[in-house]
Amino acid sequence: MSWHEEELEKQLRRLKETESPPRPEYVRETQRRLQLRTNQLKHRLHFQRVANRVAGVAAIVLLGGWVSTESGQQSLQTLWEHTIKNEQPSATIVPAPTPKSTPPPFSPPPANTPKENKVVNRPPETNRPKTTTVRTEHKKQPERALPPVATSPLKQTDAVTDATPIPPLVKKAKTYVLEMLGEQGEHYQYNPSQSDLKRGTIGFSRVVHGIPFYEASYTVKMNDDQVSNFQILQESDQLLSLAQIPKPTAVLSKEKAEEALASTLRLVYREKGGEVASLHYELDIAGFIDANTGALVTGQGVPIQRDEGKRIVPIAAEGRTLKAGASEETLSLLIQEFALPFSSDNWQGTTSVGRDGIREYQWEKKETELTARVHENGQLLSYRINSKQEARSSSGKNQEPLPEALLQPAIEHLQRYLDKTIKELELTSISREAAEVRFRFTKLYQGIPVVDHSYEVIMDTNTGEVVGMSGAFGQGATSYPDPAKAISKQAAEATLRKNHPLELAYIFTGKKGTSDKQALLVYRVYKEKGIKTYIDAITGAVLERTQEEP
């Protein structure tokens, strides 16, 4: 041994002598961790074995249940016949016999038959009662979630819900209603007019004699296919009244109701704030069709006079601009332009901005309140004067001018700020409220109303002065489709019948909170809540828009 090896051996011995053993606590901690991991592994393997056994038993139960059904037995018989037919020739190919064995005869392998019989026969004998229970419950659940849609007992054609497919979201909401109400839920059916599927709102109306009653309903709010809210929209006294509604015997035919609906169809323009307008056929109805008389009625059952008070008013537009900016600038514009009897000093004002960018100003001074709305481009949209002192003193006056006497001053005030291309307006309504009269006008182009371009002027009956004005001031569209190229009204009516189906419904007439309510059977347009359809007068296509749009 060389001196190098001797030196290395000495160093190794000294290292072994100086190296201390591990601390006891370290040894205990290591043993504890090893024992913990061993236990975890044992539990995991145990649960794995249990899960595998449960899965195997469940598979056998399900297979036995399927085999116990008539369709399962037929499928198995077909599969067996197919196996016999296709595998019988291959029975001649058998394993090479051993020296002590003899070749099997020409037949299907006998070893397979007992194996197949075990799969077919044993599960039905041991698991049939349990499987039948599961299968029965599985069949009942869809029948409860999808009850047949109630239709009118008068005519099959009077109900339009049969032709409307039920969306999956509605099926889930219907299941929830049935779970909440039990058997009573069968008296409620899906109502598109009270639903907004885009926002997850599904409405269900009470059905009386197969006819929906809109004022007794439930609303289910869905969020990501889950129910987030459940709302009741009905009064207890209404439910008692519904039980007293007699079954209708004679009802106006749907053809007659469609004729009444088609009579409200009119040709209109829509500008939608752009330079190019569009030409449409739209319904001019804000109520229902009486299913007994065919008359147009309001929600209180009052007959509607569509053209009452309407007239064409020629004007001489001056085209004055109403541009405003900040709060002080807008206040100064109002006082100077409209000759208001106020000074621009000592007003306390507030400003708010809406989501659409429209600024709303409000000023107060003693007994007077002044408000204004300004577009983000600086165009004044409206102003309003409220005088509390005049409102209190108005009750002492006996003689007030008739609305007709205030019409001409209202027109003269309005036409100063209309675009010069406007030659005439349609007076659409006159309404009176306390000491004020409101005149509403719609812009006309070649005698056709521009329904989203309207104005309102408010007159004080005490002073005869204008106290408010609003509208789409400024220049409108510059290009309008030629009405000579529009489809005929008859073609529009035919499209209307296809895309605006009518349904029978009950409404309660009379004022809310009173006991003189009566059930009235009406026809109404079957549509989804918040959606309004119209017909493109040039192409004849059916279009949709939300009712929030003007």
Image (spheres, rainbow, N blue to C red):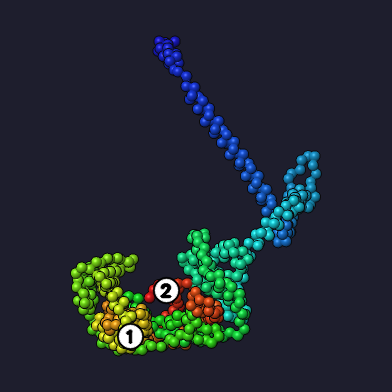
Distance from Cα at disc 1 to Cα at disc 2: 42 Å
Q: In the figure, 409 relative to 57: above or below?
A: below
Percent position of residue 327, x then y = 23, 68
Is residue 243 rendered to the left or right of residue 267? right
- The residue furthest front is 396
**Res 159 seen here:** yes
Q: Nearer the viewer, residue 274 or 549?
A: 549
The structure residue drawn at horizontal position 70% and vertical position 55%, both measured from the top left corner, is 131
Residue under label 2: 547
Percent position of residue 372, x then y = 28, 72
Is residue 354 rendered to the left or right of residue 129? left
Q: Which mark is residue 94?
A: none
Label 1 secondary element: loop
Q: In the figure, 363 relative to 412: above or below?
A: above
Q: Residues within 10 Å of mark 2 (few under 14, many from 20)?
A: few
Q: Nearer the viewer, residue 360 or 38?
A: 360
The structure residue drawn at horizontal position 45% and vertical position 72%, both measured from the top left corner, is 530
The structure residue drawn at horizontal position 52% and vertical position 60%, both measured from the top left corner, is 227
Residue under label 1: 398
Three-letter code, disc 1:
Asn
Percent position of residue 517, x then y = 53, 78
Percent position of residue 503, x then y = 54, 78
Q: Nearer the viewer, residue 27 or 420?
A: 420
Three-letter code, disc 2:
Gln
Label 2 secondary element: loop
* Lower position in the chain sequence, tag 1 or tag 2: 1
Q: Residues within 10 Å of mark 1 (few under 14, many from 20)?
A: few
Q: Quadrant of the N terminus?
A: top left
Of labels 1 and 2, the one closer to you: 1
The structure residue drawn at horizontal position 60% and vertical position 78%, both measured from the top left corner, is 245
